[in-house]
């Protein structure tokens, strides 16, 4: 499924909370709650089990025991910018979970490649054998 096919996150599955941010902003940081904490209820999305497993792996420690992904955005100085940043990061995570990894195709070395490898090993063995102590028998 390509990113264009993935619908936007439903508002009913999202919960927003604003926190006091850290970082740049001077006194503004102490007075205004600009950091955005966004919670996404994963079960409300109704995902395919394989997509859910990939999303859980992508979310890592951001996923809670009750099946919610928590993303905190505090990169910017305004609420609107942090809200947009959190929503974008969450949407990208869900979109990445919809992309199935390509299956690896097993390959075998050719007969000629195996023969070259054995030949190289025997040559290397001869070189190493020549490094031994010289006997005057």
Image (cartoon, rainbow, N blue to C red):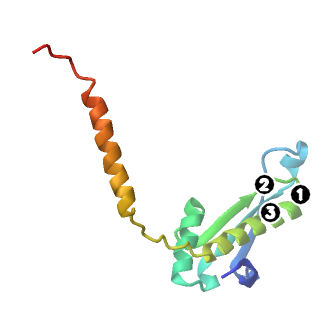
Q: Which structural element holds mark 3?
A: helix
Is 136 or 58 nearer to us in this picture? 136
- Image side of residue 104 versus residue 4, left or right: left
Please tell me which residue lies in front, 69 or 93: 93
Looking at the image, residue 10 sits to the left or right of residue 102; the answer is right
What is the spatial separation of the Cα atoms under label 3 and label 1, in whole angstroms?
11 Å
Q: Dot 1: what SS?
A: loop
Who is closer to the viewer here, 41 or 115? 115
User: Could you tell me residue 53's position as x and y percent?
Assistant: 52, 74
> In the image as oriented, which residue stretches furthest toward the left?
137
- Front one among 113 and 10: 113
Q: Which residue is mark 2?
A: 74
Label number found at residue 2: none
Instruction: Measuring from the top left, give residue 77's x and y in whole percent.
Output: 88, 53
Q: Secondary structure at mark 2?
A: loop
Residues at circles 3 and 1 in contact by the CB criterion of under 8 Å? no
Q: Which residue position holds label 3?
A: 85
Which residue is painted at 70% across and 80% down in the image?
2
- Relative image position of residue 71 (x, y in whole percent): 69, 63
View extreme (top): residue: 136
């Amino acid at each position: 499924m390509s990113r264009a096919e993935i619908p936007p996150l439903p508002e009913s599955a999202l919960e927003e909370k604003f926190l006091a941010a850290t970082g740049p902003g001077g006194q503004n940081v102490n007075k205004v709650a600009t950091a955005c904490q966004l919670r996404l209820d994963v079960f409300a999305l109704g995902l395919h089990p394989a997509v859910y497993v990939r999303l859980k792996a992508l979310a890592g420690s951001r996923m809670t025991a009750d099946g919610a992904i928590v993303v905190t955005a505090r990169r910017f100085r305004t609420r609107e910018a942090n809200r947009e940043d959190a929503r974008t990061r969450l949407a990208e995570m869900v979109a990445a979970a919809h992309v199935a990894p390509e299956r690896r195709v097993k390959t075998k070395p050719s007969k000629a490649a195996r023969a070259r490898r054995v030949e190289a090993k025997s040559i290397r063995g001869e070189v190493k054998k020549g490094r031994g102590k010289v006997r005057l028998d």
